[in-house]
Amino acid sequence: MRAALAATAALLLLVGCGTTTRKPPIEIFPDMDRQPKYKPLAASPFFPDGRASRMPVPGTVAVGQLREDDSYYTGISGNLYVGRNPRPLDAALLARGRTRFEVYCAPCHDRAGDGRGIVATRGAWLAVNLHEDRVVQMTDGELFHVATFGRRTMPGYRFQISADDRWAIVAYIRALQRATQGTLEDVPPELRKGVR
């Protein structure tokens, strides 16, 4: 009896493996291999416009693109540049601004912000010295706007640097400017002993 079952199983195995057929095999779990659907951009008789792909509802906002506060993303409120950085100033913001500044700004403006970066010294144009009076007198919004859209020979960085990081860079530029224009009165009294 065992021999007959083994022979039958072996025969079925050989028959199942050795033939070719145009009939598809029986699928127990089709896993949605064949489903009724339209391919992207295919025609469809179902909709009046004949398209299977539907247009987004007017006013649809792509994921991650909601810009409720337009001035935060452009540096302009109404017709004026934003006066002050909208991000709260803290050590983490300055640290982030420093790292982003050293990556994106220092090649032209140098790490000190004096406009003597490697691109400016070896390139065809000079970068702006961020310690000049005209730059110091710019509002935070104007600095942000320049970093976003560019000015003269400087390209805009709105696609390379996020808005949060551009505001962090503005905060760090202000710290650099303050460091070069500081006085002894800016140092807390308990720390003045170590200052020459």
Image: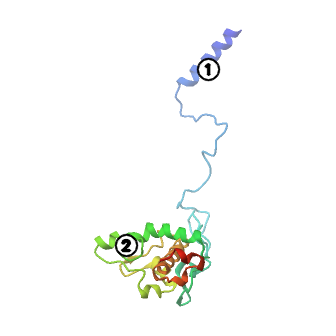
Residue at point 64%, 41% (across, down): 30
Res 54 seen here: yes
> Disc 1 designates what residue?
12
Residue at point 42%, 73% (across, down): 112
User: Dividing the picture into quarters, in which one does residue 55 lie?
Assistant: bottom right
- Horizontal side, residue 188 vs residue 111: left or right: right
Q: Secondary structure at mark 2?
A: helix
Check disc 1 and give the amino acid type. Answer: Leu
Res 55 seen here: no
129 or 148: which is nearer to us?
A: 129
In the displayed structure, 147 sits above or below 5; it is: below
Q: Could you tell which of marks 2 and 1 lies nearer the N-terminus?
A: 1
Check disc 2 and give the amino acid type. Answer: Cys
Q: CA distance from mark 2 to mark 1?
A: 76 Å
Residue at point 61%, 20% (across, down): 12
Image coordinates of residue 7 in percent, x first then y, are: 63, 13
> Disc 2 designates what residue?
108
97 or 31: which is nearer to us?
A: 97
Image coordinates of residue 179 in percent, x first then y, are: 48, 78
Q: Secondary structure at mark 1?
A: helix
